[in-house]
Amino acid sequence: MPCGGRHRRRTASSHRAGLPQPGRDQREHFPRLSGVTPAALAELVRTTAVDVLAGRGLDTAALPPAVTIERPRNPEHGDYATNVALQTAKKIGVVPRDLASWLAEALAGQDAIASAEVAGPGFLNLRLAADAQGGIVLEALRAADGYGRGEELAGTRINLEFVSANPTGPIHLGGARWAAVGDALGRVLSARGADVTREYYFNDAGAQIDRFVRSLIAAALGESAPEDGYAGAYVNDIAAEVLRQEPSVLSLPEQERHEAFRRVGVTLMFTEIKQSLHEFGTDFDVFFHEDSLHRSGAVGEAVEALKTSGALYFENGAWWLRSTEFGDDKDRVVIKSDGDPAYIAGDIAYLKDKRSRGFDLCIYMLGADHHGYIGRLKAAAAALGDDPAAVEVLIGQMVNLVSEGKPVRMSKRAGTVITMEDLVGAVGVDAARYSMTRSSVDSSLDLDLDLLRKHTNDNPVFYVQYAHSRLASLLRNAADLGLAPGDPAEADLSLLAHDREGDLIRTIGEFPRVVGAAAELREPHRVARYLEQLAGDYHRFYEACRVLPRGDEETTPLHRARLQLCAATRQVFANGLAVLGVSAPERM
RNA sequence: GCGCUCAUAGCUCAACGGAUAGAGCACUUGACUACGGAUCAAGAGGUUGCAGGUUCGAAUCCUGCUGAGCGCACCA
């Protein structure tokens, strides 16, 4: 993202809260099993490194504040790896491999660490003791719906504005992408503690609404759409509905007729947009009408304030914002020479309104065709005497349609616009949302129209959902056998020592970090990719490890432990899919 | 011309400066008389657009180039 979207925002509370730690009660019950989540392992490595450096009289300040623990791609490199020695060695003037070997020696003495080896230029590869990894399963089951939640953003009030499509037509494909991604981003930010308000801005003031209303009237009169107007079946439908509600509307004087079509027609459009978004699983806390800013005088007040502060100057009959002084590439007209406010006037008043409502951060999700707004919105903030950093603009690239290998050009006039409802009708809400949330918004997205028409399951969402429903089925079967997972504290999770079990457990352990990264980087697609990884790990585990006792086989502690692992896995699927706004089916 | 974004397997896309660049789809070959085969195993498929630079290490950061999308209003 441009504009600082990747920059981590720290709040006072983020230092205080830190990463979630296992509860004390749990630690007392399970001294061996507490703490070997990735976060705890990172802390263990860090404290060990502090001891090692201090013991050798070296500067412990050279260590990074948070040690990076990652899962190596290559399983031969252990369960986890850290590059802390590589990062630190140069600063304190030692050879990376030497530092790594000192750390390895110290860590190898820890109960939870099965092995610690130096590799390559100074990586430290760690293997956990099998009984230590069980703590991850326990943590996921203990936290349940809360597994994956965090507190880094606690105390931060975020206004998340997305979609905000013009109320002159149905939501199109691009809008659907922002609806899916914005909604998921809102859920991700909430999961990490932020107080999020989802907001939709209706641009219901200005010339485009007039064009829309004239188009409705033309349709009602059976005339063709105005040159600069809107065409399409929905215009006829809305015009017809206006006539149904107000049969005498066409006989009104022109002014009143226009106002009646505006009042009824625009409301109908609002209703339709809200309804289709709701059916798409995206609901907003606030639908904000630009018109209200003009009627309340908020726009006038904001403009007067800017005149007073000198942020505006008068030239050629218009009032200009000195936006170049705030990083924009040119000055912008705020009040046109005909006396009407320009579009940006509403933006300025709207931002002021948001901030007066107490939001610490205002996130805007905009399409690539609006990227020129970044400088403008930041300039607006600066001109208001506000902190431009409180404005964060996320730019998402466009959605293209491809058919028979060729791009499909969408045209309002040709009636080839694909709407969000068309997409949902073709593939359903889950597949539509998932296909749009699984990739980065930095890249334009090509959707294959032929595949959509065929209703094919060519979508990884089914791979993920199938894993969840398979787990749900397995847990049902267990219940039929009188085998409830029961209290995980009573299971011997140290029995989960199979390679496939270890892989699955460690992936479960990644979930909180993935959600955290998705929130910090404003990249909810990380959650979708994670779920695909988890599904793969689960299916491979399932193939290799029998969970339920067969026939008259006796139920063993291993069966019980695996059942706990399955319960934990199901929980993570449910939590992850919930973040994406995709259903977690019990059956498929 | 200036700016933003992108360029990775046949296709759609991942990979927060880390080790041998990964998934899904498509393709080849295998695996179902007990937990869901919408699954799994194996194989094939790559000069990460090109050229330099930064460093222990670059798909990732910097510069230039090529190509694509989108912007560059007293429209909204």
Image: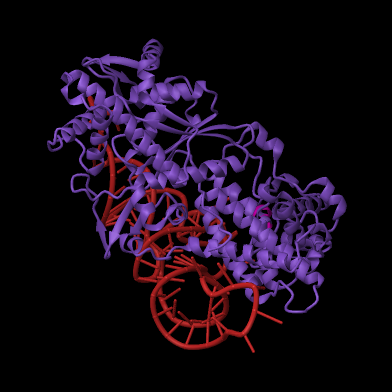
Chain colours: A purple, B red
At 27% from the left and 65% from the top, the residue drawn is A405
Instruction: Identify which residue, B19 or A188, lies in the foreground.
Output: A188
Instruction: Identify which residue, A193 or A310, lies in the foreground.
Output: A193
Instruction: Identify which residue, A499 or A386, lies in the foreground.
Output: A499
Q: Is residue A105 left or right of residue A332?
A: right
Q: Main secondary structure of the magenta part?
A: helix
**Is residue A94 rendered magenta in the image?**
no
At 21% from the left and 33% from the top, the residue drawn is A216
Can see residue A398? Answer: no
- Is A464 situated above or below A558? above
**Is residue A88 rendered magenta in the image?**
yes
Q: Quadrant of the N terminus of chain A?
A: top left
Can see residue A186? Answer: yes
- Is A83 situated above or below A257? below
Q: Is residue A379 left or right of residue A501?
A: left
The range drawn in magenta is A85-89
